[in-house]
Image: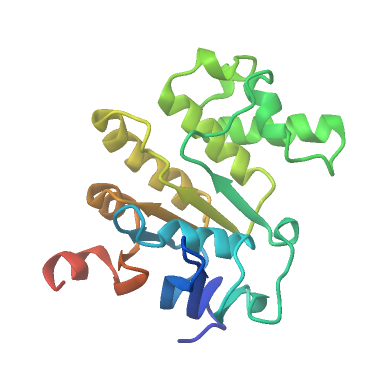
Amino acid sequence: MNSIRALLSIKQLEIDYPSRDGQGRVTAVKDLNLELAQGEIGCLLGSSGCGKSTVLRAICGFEPLKTGEIFLRDKVVSSVIVQLPPNQRKIGMVFQDFALFPHLNVLENIAFGLQHLSSSQRSSVAMNWLKRVSLADKADAYPHELSGGQQQRVALARAMAPEPDLILLDEPFSSLDIELRERLAGEMREILKTNNITALLVTHDQFEAFAIADKVGVMTEGKVLQWDIPYQLYHKP
C-alpha cells in the first residue's frame, strides 16, 4: 500500500479485549488493511458484531491497538506506542441517532463545534453549511420539528462544519424507514462528493454500501474479506 497518497491508511490492524469470563482475550479486529484517498468514500459492510464499529472507534482514538498502525495524512495517530488524543485528530462523526441537541435550534447545533471562532463567525459558517445541505430555511427550527431526513442532513452539516480531515458514519440510516434510506443514501453521497469529503461508513445494509461508497470492505468475524469497488464485489466476490 502507498500511504503517501492516502488520507486514511490502516495497516495490519488488530484489536482485542478481555473475554466475558475474564479468562482470556477475544479478537475483535484481525489483520485489517485499507486506504482512502482525499474525497473518497469507503464502507465497511457486515453484520452486527463483526468488528466494523470497533474500527471506527479505533480511528477516533477510543480503542487501543494490539498491533498495527493508523495514519491520517501520513501521520501516525494510533499504534502500539502512539495514541493521539481524539480531539486532535480532526475527525467528524455522524451517529445512528444523529445526537442533535434538543434545546438548540438547527443553526446552533451546527455552530456548537466551532467554539474556536467568534460568535458572528460561527453563525456565518453554520449558515453556509445549512445552505450546502439545502436547509437554510430551517435555521431557527428545533430538531423535533424536522423530519428524519432533515435531522440527518443537520448532523452531517455539523460534522463537516469544522472542516475535519475525515468523516465517520456509524449506521447513519438504521433509524429510518426503507424508502427514506434509499433516497437519503443518494443525497448523502452527493453532499460528500460535492464537498470533496473523505468518509468511512459502516453498515449492515448492502444497498446502502453500494449506493454510497467508492470502495466497500466485506467484513466478518473481525476480518475484511475483500476491499474493492462495488462493481468488483458484486461481479467477482
Q: In this view, does 135 lie above or below 226?
A: above
Left or right of residue 143, residue 34 in this image: left
Depth order, front residue of 36/99: 99
Q: Which residue lies furthest to the bottom in this view?
A: 1
**Residue sitting at x 33%, y 42%:** 186
Number of callouts in the render?
0
| Scheme of image coloration | rainbow
Left or right of residue 59, residue 36 in this image: left
Q: Residue furthest left?
A: 235
Depth order, front residue of 66/96: 66
| Residue 166 percent coordinates (x, y) | 57, 58
User: Which quadrant is home to the C terminus?
Assistant: bottom left
User: Which quadrant is home to the N terminus?
Assistant: bottom left
**Residue sitting at x 36%, y 38%:** 174
| Residue 46 percent coordinates (x, y) | 30, 58
Q: Is residue 170 above or below residue 16?
A: above
| Residue 2 percent coordinates (x, y) | 49, 86
**Residue sitting at x 38%, y 32%:** 175
Depth order, front residue of 143/65: 65
Left or right of residue 27, residue 228 in this image: left
Q: Which residue lies furthest to the right in this view?
A: 118
**Residue sitting at x 57%, y 33%:** 99
